[in-house]
Amino acid sequence: MNFMGYTRPDGGVGVRNHLLVLPSVVCASDVAARIALQLNGAVYVTHQHGCAQLPSDSAQTKRTLVGFGANPNVAACIVVGLGCETIQAKDVADEIAKMTAKPVVYLSIQEEGGTLNAIARGVRIGREMLAELSLMRREEHPISKLILGLECGGSDAWSGLSANPAVGNASDRLIRAGGTSILSETQEMIGAEHLLARRAASPEVAERLFAVVRRAEEGALADGVDIRLANPTPGNRQGGLTTLEEKSLGCISKAGLEAPLQEILGFSERPTRRGLIFMDTPGHDIESITGMVAGGAQVIFFTTGRGTCTGCPIAPVIKVCSNSPTFERMRDNMDADAGPIIEGKKTIDEIGGELFDEMLKVASGRSTKSEDLGYGSFAINRIGPTQ
Amino acid sequence: MTFNAHSVTEKDDVASVVCDIAPGETVTMQRRSGTLALTAVTAIPAGHKIALRDFRAGESVIKYGEVIGAASEDISKGAHVHVHNLEGLRGRGDKR
C-alpha cells in the first residue's frame, strides 16, 4: 500500500512541502512571523522559550525546535535567533541539517543589525528556498514511511465508544502494513495503563510505561489535590465523562486492539522502532501534538466529542468527531464523523476503514479543515520554571 | 428495534444514554446476551450514565469492563451516575 509524498535527502518522506521559519527564542518570534508573512507559502511558529531555562528544560525545548525543523513535512527551514539567547539559532540549524541534510539557514537579529535587516535577509533567503520547493514533486512511497500521531481532546462520553476505537482500527491497519503510530497524553493513561502494558513487546517497555504514568499521577498526589480539578475538564464532564479512569479507558482505544507496544519515548523524541509507540506528553492537546510532530509524526488523527478547532502548522490534523450533532454544528472544523457508530448505522471496522483511506488521501496531499483555516497551534512542554 | 443507550461490555454496571432521558422513561440497550431494558428513576442528560444495578456507597463502578471509580453514596438502579455520586480513585492527592 502506497501514498504520494516528498522524498527527503535522509530517506524520510514528507506529506507536505513546507518552508518553516522557526524562532530559536521568544525574542525572535516577531521577526520570524514577519519573514513568513511576506513569503507566500511559508509557515512559522512562535513560542515563549529559548532562554532563561534550567538545562533539562532548555534541552527539551531545543529538542522540540530541532525536531520540528527536522520533520519530513518541512522541506527547508530558516531559524531566527536574537543572538544572546541560550538556544542559539546556529546550533538549532546545524542540528537540523546534520539530522536531515535538508536546506537550513540561520540568521541572528543582532548580527544582521536589527529587525529590518534581519527581516529583509530572511525574506530574500526564503524566496529562493520557495523557488526550489516549487519544483519538488510527490513520488510513490510505501506506507511504512508514515508515522501517525494519535490525539484526543474536548472528549465526551462518545469519544471512547466511537471516534477513538475507529481511529484505533485505522491505526491497527497502518501498523499491519508496516507503519507506525504514536499514542501520547500520559495523564490519560491513569487507570488504563495495565491494559496497554499487557501489549508491551518486552517487560522493560511495560515497566517504563508504569513508571511514566506513576510520575504523571505523582504531580496531583504531591500537590495534595484531586486530579479531577484538572482532568476531566468541565467540557468533558458536561459531555458525560465523570472520572479520569473513565476518560483514560476511552483514550487508550485510539491505540487499537492488537498492535504490540514497542517503545516508550520522552517528549519530542524520535521513534527507533516501527509499530505502536507511546510518547510521554501532557494531556494538553497542543503540547502533545507538538511533541509527536517534533518526534517525526507526519499526520495526526484528532478525535473530539465537544468539538475542537486546533491544528498544527506543519502537519495535517484529521478531526474525527464522536457524535453527529457536534459534527453538524462544527462542520467547518470537523473532517470525519464517527457518530454513525453510536446510531448503529455503521460499525467501528467500517468507519476505521474509511478513516484509513482518508489518512492515505491526506498523506498524498488532500488538505484538512485545520490546514484550510490556517491553524498554526504550537506549544512546547516545559519541565522547569522560567529563570 | 432502536436502542437509546450503549453498554460497552457485559461486565459494565453503567450504560451511556444516547438522548436526554426523563424519569419513568424506558432505557434499552443491546448486549451480547440480549436486550436489556430498565426504567430511569431520574433525568439523565444525553451522553451521561445510567446505573444498571443498585450500588452501596464505596462500591466499584465498572465501565469498559474496568473500574472507573467508586460510588460516593448509595445509587439506585435507573439513576443518573455522574460527579455527584461517583468519584475517581486515582490521582487523589486530597485523600492522601
Image (cartoon, coloured by chain):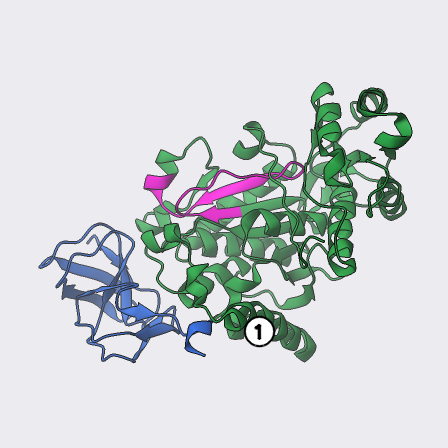
Chain colours: A green, B blue
Per the image, the residue denoted by label 1 is: A214
Give above or below for A17 relative to A282. Answer: above
Question: Is residue A270 shown left or right of residue A175?
Answer: right
Whole-percent x, y for residue A67 in the image? 76, 48
Question: Is residue A273 shown left or right of residue A188?
Answer: right
Say what amino acid the circle numbered 1 marks. Arg
Q: Is residue A380 at least partly visible in the picture?
A: yes
In front: B16, or B92? Answer: B92
Quarter where residue A137 is shown: top right
Give above or below for A226 relative to A104. Answer: below
| Element on which disc 1 rests | helix
- Give the total number of marks visible in the rendering: 1
- In the displayed image of the protein, which residue is found farthest to the left? B24
Q: Is residue A147 at least partly visible in the picture?
A: no
In front: B96, or A105? Answer: B96
Give above or below for B68 relative to A155. Answer: below
Question: Is residue A300 shown left or right of residue A146?
Answer: left
Dot 1 surroundings within 10 Å: few (below 14), some, or many (20 or more)? some
Image point (54%, 72%), residue name:
A222
Image point (76%, 60%), residue name:
A56
Give above or below for A380 relative to A328. Answer: below
Residue A303 sits inside the magenta stretch: yes
Q: Which of the chains bears the disc numbered 1? A: A
Q: Which residues are magenta?
A: A302-326
In front: B82, or A58? Answer: A58
Residue B56 sits inside the magenta stretch: no
Whole-percent x, y for residue A367 in the image? 59, 31
Image point (58%, 29%), residue name:
A374
Quarter where residue A385 is shown: bottom right
Question: Is residue B25 shown left or right of residue A81?
Answer: left
Whole-percent x, y for residue A50 in the image? 76, 46
- In the displayed image of the protein, which residue is found farthest to the front? A387
